[in-house]
Image (spheres, rainbow, N blue to C red):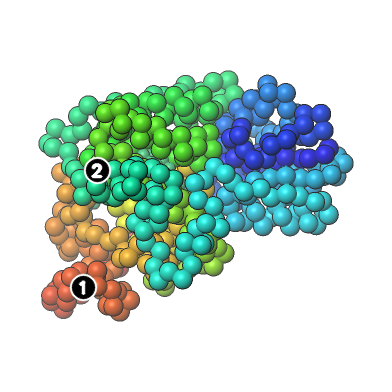
Amino acid sequence: IRNLVLVLGDQLNHDSAAFAGFDSKRDRVWMAENDQEATHVWCHKARLVAFFSPMRHFRDELIADGKQVLYHELTGDRRKRRGSSFQSILDKTLGEHEVENVRFVHPGDYRVREQLRSTLEQAGVTFDELPDEHFYCSPERFNEWATNRKSMILEQFYRVMRTEHSVLVDSKGDPEGGQWNYDKDNRGKFGKAGPANLFQPISFKPDETTRAVIAMVEDRFADHPGTLDAFDLPVCRADALAYLDDFIENRLPDFGDFQDAMWGGEKFLYHSRLSNAINLHLLSPREVVDAAVKAYHEDRAPLNSVEGFVRQILGWREYVRGIYWNKMPEYEGLNSLRCDPDQDVPAFFWDGKTDMACVADAMRLLIDTAYAHHIQRLMVLGLYAQLHGTHPAKFHQWHMAMYADAIDWVSLPNALGMSQYGDHGLMATKPYCATGKHIQRMSNHCKSCRYDPAKSTGDDACPFTTLYWDFLDRHQDTFRGNNRMTLQLKNVEKKSDDEMQAIRQRAKQLREFWSS
Ligand code: FAD
Ligand code: SF4
């Protein structure tokens, strides 16, 4: 074999740099499903299917395109379980074939990259590591931007990206509509009647390939969390393109207004649910952004929605990847609030069994679909984990286990940094902490809940509210120098000693009760 081209599970793009100059006679593609990737965190079953089914579809497309593929497939037969790892499968291939050179695109996971490089070095095989051209911003470009900066605020990075890539800017370099950011228009709430004109995303019935993967996962990973009954994610590029069209046509127009809102019993609201397809590289971020901008120019979606959506992809998504490669490997060990390393997520994060209406609703969605939208992740589950005192690395591990779109480069900065403030404000200038009243303002959950978001003590006190005051109390010293926290800290000081004592007591009970 002249070139063995490694394709990782989140690199499913046919225009990948790895295929440049591919010669079907002399080159081979190599892909591997392995136990280690599926079990190093205790993955949701839908997350496993969301990786393996697209890999098998991609393999079949490569074969149809005339390429020869060495593919390691996991079977449902547990007796054949070999605890296969990425290295062991690759080592075996290198032992069985004469390989002159290995090519691969820069992996999205620091750990995988290290393992891959050391396996090849130990095997004495030459290799080319190619840049991942899927992203707008290379790690080198991000490092250049980040060098000598006091802070790495998203908004500054986002404007540079808009300008460099001419997205929603006019010929003079000014932002479309005169403003860079329409965030203030994107905090709408639903009226009493709830969301209107809501079109559910199109749903893909599992085909034969997906059904085979589902059967394998149900058998081989039977004890993993989550259910597969509702699995309907796009698993190939054609599905992903149809999903994108459906979002642009039916949900993008209202995406901006209701970006931060929640509504009990609903699933995706006006969110795109495109993270999976983009993270697996079934879609490129450029084509997604271009489709949204085109809808704006054709008057099919308003500017606040399109700018808000572009900010998520060209802004946040590129930014968290930049942070990841700029700060790894130290980043994963950060714990700026000095949380107990043994403090795991609360028990109900696995089964959703809680009487907190907002949490139960987010968990129902998560267990059924391996998805929750951004505000549920940040202002319900992430917030609860933070107030509970969860160690940020444990929260990240839980996130990696439960969400179909979780990949290390994107989960780690969002979970450890943005959500848990583990990086001491590198990503967020203040912690995302709030009482239950915030959830009450942004949703209808509190109406059907047995707790009262205004109360911090007593049997019906909202656990978010109790734990919020306790959180500020515990971290007063850490936050004292932060201007953005001044008002919140003043409010803690206004509480009487007796009240604070009662809050601490109830917070302790809640923490003990819910510790997994
Ligand atoms: P939409 O709301 O429709 O947003 C559009 C797209 O923008 C998303 O598909 C995604 O590609 C991108 N995007 C939006 N916000 C972010 C962000 N903060 N970082 C990176 N991309 C973003 N996203 C992941 O893809 N994988 C993760 O593992 C992940 N972990 C997260 C953990 C926490 C604690 C939080 C608060 C957020 C996390 N996010 C993660 C970001 C975001 O919540 C999801 O991308 C989004 O909810 C996916 O749903 P959607 O496709 O409907 O997004
Ligand atoms: Fe959630 Fe508290 Fe509201 Fe209940 S009262 S839904 S726990 S915020």
Q: Residue at x 68, y 36 (%)?
A: 19
In depth, the one of 439 and 256 nearer the eye is 256
Q: Which residue is mark 1?
A: 486
Q: Which residue is mark 2?
A: 177
Mark 1 is surrounded, within 10 Å at the Cα level, by few (under 14), some (14 to 19) or many (20 or more) other residues, namely few
Does the numbered disc 2 mark a residue whose Cβ is under 8 Å from ligand 1?
Answer: no
In depth, the one of 36 and 415 nearer the eye is 415
Gap between marks 1 and 2 measured at Cα = 34 Å
Q: Would residue 390 be found to the left or right of residue 305 on screen?
A: right
Q: Residue at x 20, y 33 (%)?
A: 195
Q: Position of residue 5 (x, y in %)?
A: 72, 40
Secondary structure at numbered mark 1: helix
Q: How many marks?
A: 2
Q: Quadrant of the C terminus?
A: bottom left
Q: Quadrant of the N terminus?
A: top right
Taking the image as drawn, is residue 251 in sight?
Answer: no
Q: Would residue 235 be found to the left or right of residue 246 on screen?
A: right
Q: Is residue 480 above or below residue 20?
A: below
Q: Residue at x 26, y 38 (%)?
A: 303
Residue 4 falls in image quadrant: top right
Which label lies toward us, 1 or 2?
A: 2
Secondary structure at numbered mark 2: helix
| Amino acid on which disc 1 is placed | Thr
Q: Position of residue 174 (x, y in %)?
A: 31, 48
In depth, the one of 229 and 49 nearer the eye is 49
Does the numbered disc 1 mark a residue whose Cβ is under 8 Å from ligand 2?
Answer: no
Q: Is residue 507 above or below residue 290?
A: below
Residue 300 falls in image quadrant: top left
Q: Is residue 300 above or below residue 352?
A: above
| Amino acid on which disc 2 is placed | Gly
